[in-house]
Image: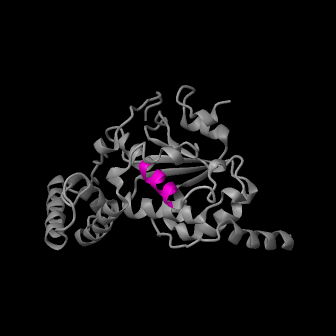
């Protein structure tokens, strides 16, 4: 038993030699199959509504205005328009994430808007990510799950960190998150991520990318991830999870380990089942 423990500790550095851990601490239905239509990223519209029951709509409007004015005064160089400093839907969402603290919302929004600029999120297109997308490692499913959520599919066995540039993987990740959120039905606010770990090996492990993924959802798309399914995780994945789990805090509560059969029965109809889960 002791020998096994030693092997696990030695294997982790080989799995992720360039690992940098700076994970954030929180990220915090129809039964019919619903197929969503493709969207251009330039026309993305991310829907968010559903105010907390205890907050009067008039109060929320005042807070949105307060954030807009503070951003204009203190960060006038930030862009305006969709996903800019005057985007009221985006402001409201970040206010909700920050429990309606104006100062905290401004701080987080400033970082998110600057990141969108630096990352050139608006410039991401199918063409821009087609090479890495052709690996089949990740995609947005054509159908929603039975709870009306867009589905981000990740195939762990097709991810080879040594074969692709990290920046290419990061661009694909952000493109797919934007695409999934653009498919949110009215009244829905979160997506589901399904990570198929069948066939996953040490050569597929990439803690640096996992760090980037959780940073993205915490800082730039807060509370947009409703659930994460780890499907048929093999033994080799367990030490990775044990290493990462304590750092995820509330993120960890979103994770469910399940089988492919449970995915089929509990999240999709026969018509809406993702291709990699069809018999």
* 86 to the left or right of 213: left
Q: Residue at x 55, y 70 (%)?
A: 247
* 8 to the left or right of 224: right
Q: Quarter-wise, where is residue 259 in the image?
A: top right
Q: Main secondary structure of the magenta part?
A: helix
Image coords of residue 113 (percent x, y)? 29, 62
Q: Quarter-wise, where is residue 43 in the image?
A: top left
Query: Is residue 192 depicted above or below 67 in this figure?
Result: above
Q: Residue at x 30, y 44 (%)?
A: 42
Badge count: 0
Image coords of residue 120 (percent x, y)? 34, 57
Q: Residue at x 62, y 36 (%)?
A: 276
Report the span colored magenta: 167-175
Query: Is residue 11 depicted above or below 139 in this figure?
Result: below
Query: Is residue 257 depicted above or below 263 in this figure?
Result: below
Image coords of residue 105 (percent x, y)? 27, 67
The scheme the figure's colours follow is one colour
């Amino acid at each position: 038993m002791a020998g096994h423990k030693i092997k696990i500790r030695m294997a982790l550095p080989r799995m992720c030699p360039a690992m940098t851990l700076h994970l954030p601490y929180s990220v915090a239905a129809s039964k019919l199959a619903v197929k969503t239509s493709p969207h251009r990223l330039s026309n993305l519209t991310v829907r968010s509504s559903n105010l907390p029951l205890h907050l009067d709509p008039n109060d929320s409007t005042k807070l949105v205005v307060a954030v807009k004015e503070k951003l204009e005064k203190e960060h006038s160089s930030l862009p305006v328009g969709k996903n800019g400093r005057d985007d009221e839907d985006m402001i409201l969402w970040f206010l909700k994430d920050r429990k309606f603290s104006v100062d905290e919302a401004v701080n987080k929004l400033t970082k998110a808007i600057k990141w969108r600029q630096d990352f050139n999120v608006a410039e991401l297109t199918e063409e821009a990510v087609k090479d890495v997308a052709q690996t089949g490692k990740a995609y947005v499913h054509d159908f929603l799950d039975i709870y009306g959520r867009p589905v981000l599919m990740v195939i762990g066995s097709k991810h080879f960190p040594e074969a692709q540039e990290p920046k290419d993987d990061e661009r694909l990740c952000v493109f797919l998150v934007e695409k999934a959120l653009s498919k949110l039905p009215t009244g829905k606010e979160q997506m589901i991520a399904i990570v198929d770990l069948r066939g996953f090996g040490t050569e597929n492990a990439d803690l640096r990318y996992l760090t980037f993924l959780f940073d993205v959802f915490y800082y730039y798309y807060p509370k947009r991830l409703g659930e994460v399914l780890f499907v048929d995780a093999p033994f080799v994945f367990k030490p990775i999870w044990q290493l990462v789990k304590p750092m995820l805090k509330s993120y960890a509560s979103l994770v469910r380990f399940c089988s492919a059969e449970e995915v089929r029965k509990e999240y999709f109809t026969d018509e809406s089942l993702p291709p990699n889960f069809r018999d």
